[in-house]
Image (cartoon, rainbow, N blue to C red):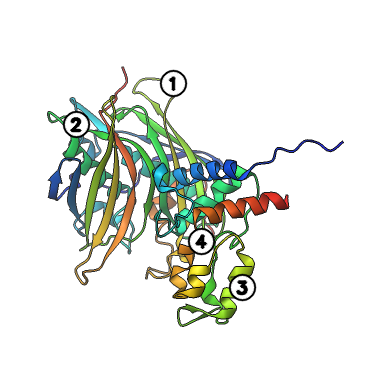
Amino acid sequence: MRFDLVDQVLEKEEGRIVTIKQVSNAEEYLADHFPSFPILPGVLMLEAMVQAASELCSKDGQRLVLGQVKALKYGAMVRPGDRLRVEVIVKQTNPDGSIMCKGTGTVLRNDTTDTETAVAGRFTIRPVRTSQ
Amino acid sequence: MRWLWIDSIIKHEPDTRLVAIKNVSLGEDYLHDYIINGRPIMPFSLLIEGMAQTAGILVGTMSGFKEKVILAKICKATLDCDVTAGDTVRFDATIDRIDDAGAATMGVIDRRVAGGDAWERIGAVELMFSHIDHNYSGTEFPEHNFVFSDNFKMILETAGLIHLMKD
Amino acid sequence: MKPQETVMNRDDIYAKIQDVLDDALGVDEDEVTAEASLTADLGAESIDFLDIVFRLEKTFDFKISQGELFPENLTENPDWVDDGKLTDAGLDMLKERMTHVDFNDIESGDRDVAKIADSITVTSLVNFVQNKLDKG
């Protein structure tokens, strides 16, 4: 399994990015989450937002990682066949290289044009920190 | 990729606290897609899931695993230092508040580097869980408790805690 | 002699509630106005109501019972809700039990049960805390 949660970049401009993560029965983690009721794990929705944010903000190919989360809540469930439309907006860039973002994920389903919010909240990405 | 983010439970204080550890190994596939500055880095989102599984089991014990407990909110999470292959992480979760609708938990993440003895504090995670039979009344889902599956039973059995799962 | 009690005034309460809402909802300070509706303006949902209850209990050191701050299980009583709309009896019950909330918009408008939560504003929270602290 590959750990890449950005299937498509729909829009990308200064301070904002919109991406898609598709959910498929072929993805292995679904077998455990949950047996007989496969749904995209909440932390993978967060990871999709983090990867979208890194795609938007990283410079010189230096990937940015998740450092903080604040008030991130989960709503609608995302099932195989659904797509998660992720939107990340940069709120603040700090001198230490960390970037505060606001992210939302909405579920796109095949049988309806109605959308529901699956995830919404704030998070901060930053350069990687490994111990000295 | 298996969706089991803790390896074993090392401490359980009934209705109060649960501590679990996880080894981080190059045998895990996602690490090979998260190489930064030549080092494989475990994404914080997956560490949060480790804490969610630790705290979720603790919340589950309080209803004998009768309630379907799912992660509803990450109130706050911070990671000060990243984790790499060879590290062991420790999730120490405690119940902050619990009632029929759901629970709030607090937790800290510690890390022990390869070949080392000492644990260092690297992060903290505060979560909220919903008891979904009470709150998700619009959604159709299976009757049985699909949340606490065989994977979790195995972890409980190994820790000698399977008696907490009332059947 | 009576011991001195620290009395918290309305401004103190408002400031603490701003902190609670900042932690629970992750909203910007300028979004938290007195008349902001928790649901319609600040995006609060049921999990956030639980979070807010837990945080208010900790901040002000009192206990909040289920249904005391936010109305619950309304639709289960046919005397109060008819076909998704709040009846007169239902509205009277809410006004009596939830004195911290201003239901005027509901009374003169739609009566849609789904919109009741929208009437709960930041001011409603301040009123609630003040009432509880006054009762002692």
Q: Nearer the viewer, mark 4 or mark 3?
A: 3
Few, some or many residues within 10 Å of mark 3 (<14, 14–19, 20+) = few
Q: Does the rendering let one see residue B11? A: yes
- Residue at 49% of width from left, 51% of height from top? C34
Q: Where does label 3 land, which residue?
A: C93
- The dot on residue B66 is 4
Q: Which is nearer the eye, A110 or B25?
A: A110
Few, some or many residues within 10 Å of mark 4 (<14, 14–19, 20+) = some
Q: Nearer the viewer, mark 2 or mark 3?
A: 3
CB under 8 Å between callouts 4 and 3? no
Mark 3–mark 1 distance (CA, rounded to whole Å): 59 Å
Q: Is residue A87 left or right of residue C109?
A: left
Q: Are marks 4 and 2 on the same chain?
A: yes
Q: Where does label 1 land, which residue?
A: B118
Q: Nearer the viewer, mark 2 or mark 1?
A: 2
Residue C41 image position (x, y, % from top left): 39, 56
CB under 8 Å between callouts 3 and 1? no
Q: Amino acid at mark 4?
A: Lys
Q: Chain of mark 1?
A: B
Q: Which is nearer the eye, A71 or B55?
A: A71
Q: Nearer the viewer, mark 4 or mark 2?
A: 2
Q: Where does label 2 land, which residue?
A: B35
Mark 2–mark 3 distance (CA, rounded to whole Å): 60 Å
Q: Amino acid at mark 1?
A: Ala
Badge 2 marks a residue whose secondary structure is strand
Badge 1 marks a residue whose secondary structure is loop
